[in-house]
Amino acid sequence: MADPLASLSAVVVPRGDADLDERERFLDRLTRLPLPRSFVFATCHRVELYAVDQTTLPRARGSRLLRGTEAARHLFRVAAGLESLVAGEVQILGQLRRVRGSVRGEPLLEALIERALRLGRDVRAGTALGSMTRSLGSLAVDEALRFVDRPAEATALVVGAGEMGKLASRALRHRVRTLLVANRDAARAAALASEIDAKAVPLADLNEALARATCVISAADTRGALFDAPRLHERLLRGPLVIVDLAVPRSVGADARALAGLVYRTADDLRDRAAPPASAIGAAERECERMTARFAGDWRGRLAVPVIRALRVRSDELRQHQLARALGKLGHLGARDREVVTALASSLTNAFLHAPTVALLASPERADAARELFRLEDSSS
């Protein structure tokens, strides 16, 4: 049986298959290409492109091309947190919600994202993955403080007040003496700082905040180098600095990453040393398989809908035409008898349509044959 999701394709470039430089180059390339009927899903550990009805797609070194049901299964695994460094991480759902608006009007991609989000919520509500407290933000904190001699006396700076910045800030608050939060949107920084008893810093005062900081976690969507060589060089004159860069693309410029005195780490340097229960992983795996089968089955049925609709329209046209001719010859009938004849015509039409409708829903790959058999010139009408 043909794959009902055959029109769907995905190019995935995950951590482990391609280094961070390659993923960034691929993401930059995708942002410059006209890519109709598609969406790009990029996080600090992956760059993925999902598209409909595209025979050729851009590739990267280390990329994997997935087609049809396999592409859907992969996104479901991503949403469940099974493809994440921290199994079950919840922030992946927030990142996926942000791309939802880019596929409005593309039914397959809309349905795919909605199912993925539903699956992600169900997995966390129904398995032990929902109780996991670790996050990429907390791993970044662990990594940063490994290089700080006396964390309890240190000042930490978090750049970004989005989901990742919030996770890092909450993990840092009780492990350092002073926590600074900087964000392009000052109101968001102030709200986060108020929640965790930190201090909000305007992005315009970044140099001043950087001068005070012992370590930095950058999780801002800066779309470019926020920390260039001159800025960091000035700070490093005061002493060593640790930066964990989680931004996509990275917020530390390539010319600044190897400066003397800078400990520079990225998402690819993080490790999660606590394994979730095997039973939770198994339950999530099974739920992904069930959702994949259910989604493919539902979409298989949808493929037949335009032909079924056209068949009903055509049948109704013929019924009305033949009924009008018959009633024109039966002018002697009273109103009650005319209602009986009209009801009979409708019943016969519905009875005739029942078998082909059921057959098409069960085997939508036969839709083209049905269109030709019943001479349905426009199955989308």
Image (spheres, helix red, strand yellow):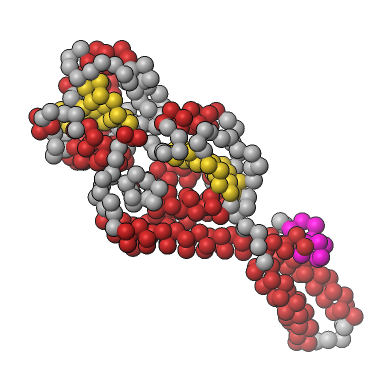
Q: Residue furthest right?
A: 329
Q: Residue at x 43, y 49 (%)?
A: 78
Does residue 128 appear to the left or right of 381 in the view shown? Answer: left
Answer whether residue 379 is visible to the viewer in this image: yes
Residue 25: % across, % down: 48, 28
In the picture, which quadrant includes the C terminus? bottom right
Position of 377 relative to 361 (above/below): above
Front residue of this view, candidates 255 and 326: 255
> Residue 139 location, x and y as percent?
26, 40
Q: Is residue 107 above or below residue 17?
A: below
Q: Residue at x 20, y 35 (%)?
A: 193
User: Image height check: is 164 above or below 223?
Assistant: below
For the record, the magenta segment spans 370-379
The reply, left or right, for residue 139 in relation to residue 150 is right
Residue 288, above or below 37: below
State the quadrant of the N terminus: bottom right
Residue 336, image x, y percentages: 75, 87
